[in-house]
Amino acid sequence: MVLPRIATAIIGVPILIAAIYFGSLPFLFVVAGIVIIGLREFYLLASETGYPSYPWIGVVGGTLVALSVYGNGVAFGNVTENQATSALIALLFAVIVIRSLYRGPADTTISEWAVTFFGIFYVGWSLGHLLLLRDMRPQGLPSTYMLFFMIWVADICAYVVGSRWGKHKIAEAISPKKTWEGTIAGIVGALVVAALFQMTVLRLYLKLPEALVIAAVTAILAFASDLVESMLKRSAGVKDSSPLLPGHGGILDRFDSFLLAAPFYYYYWAFCKH
C-alpha cells in the first residue's frame, strides 16, 4: 500500500506544484478537474447512502460556481459587485426545483434538492477559494504554497506518527485509524511549515505568532474536514470515494482537507491582510 501511495504522489505533487507556480489557466484547469471529479465522487457517495440527487446538475453547477468565484470573486462590498455568482446560484436553485417538477411528485424530492445543492457548495464553492487565493496580489503564490504544504505535511506527520505510535483513538466510530498522537503530530507539522514560510517568503506579510495561529486553525479545520468525508464514506459503506488514485483513493480523499480549510485560509488573507 505504501508504494502505490508514493508513486501517485511522485506524479501528482509535481503537477500541482507546477500548476500553482504558473497560476492563471494551468491552475484553473487543475482545480476545475479536481472539482468535476470530486463532485462526481460526492454524488456517488450520496447515492450509496440512499440519498438521491441530480448528479449532472450538481457536477455542472458546482464547476460553474467554482469558475464564477474565480472570475468574479466573493466581494462583500458594493451590492453591484459579484452579481454573476449570485445570479448563477439563483439560476441553479431554479434549475434544481424545476427538474423535480418535470418528474412529478416523489418521496425523494427534498433529498434531491438538498443533496444536489449541498454538493455544489461542499465541493465547488469550497475549492473555488483556492483559485481566489492564488490570484491574490502580491502574496498569492507563496500563501498558496503555504496552504498546500501545511496540509500535506500535516497529513504525512499524522499518518507516520499515528500508524507507528498512535494508541488513543480520536474518532473511532468515524475513522478508526485516526489517533490523538497522529493528530497532534499533524498540527505540529503544520506549525513548522508555517514558521518556515514566515521566516522566508512570507516574512513581509506575516508575523511569527500570526503564522502559527493560522497554521493551528488551518490544521484543525483540515482534520475536521477529513473526518467529515470519512463520515460520508462510513455512511456509504465504502473505504475510498473512488479507486482513481492508487494508494490514495479518490480525488475527495486527497482534497477533503481543503474543503473547510481553504475558505478560512483565504478569508483570513482577504480580511486581515488587505
Image: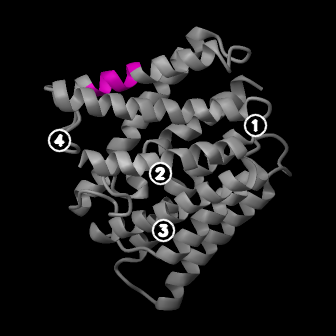
Q: Is residue 228 visible?
A: no
**Residue pictured at 35% horizontal, 66% vertical:** 46
Residue 103 counted in the magenta span: no
Say what amino acid the circle numbered 2 marks: Ile
Q: Is residue 76 above or below residue 15?
A: above
Mark 3 lies on residue: 116
Give the left or right position of residue 119, taking residue 51 as reference: right
Residue found farthest to the bottom: 103
**Foreground mark, 2 or 3?**
2
Q: Is residue 46 above or below residue 98?
A: above
Q: Is residue 196 visible?
A: yes
Mark 1 lies on residue: 136
- The residue nearer to you, when weighing 197 against 10, is 10
Distance of label 4 from label 2 (alpha carbons)? 29 Å
**Foreground mark, 4 or 2?**
2
Q: Tag 1: Cα neighbours inside 10 Å, few (<14), some, or many (≥20)?
A: some
Q: Secondary structure at mark 1?
A: loop
**Foreground mark, 3 or 4?**
4
Q: Secondary structure at mark 4?
A: loop
Mark 2 lies on residue: 11
Say what amino acid the circle numbered 1 marks: Met
Task: Answer with mark 3 or mark 4, whichever residue precedes in sequence.
Answer: 3
The mark found on residue 120 in the picture is none
Task: Answer with mark 3 or mark 1, whichever residue precedes in sequence.
Answer: 3
Which residues, given as a range, are shown in magenta? 182-188
Distance of label 2 from label 3 (alpha carbons)? 32 Å
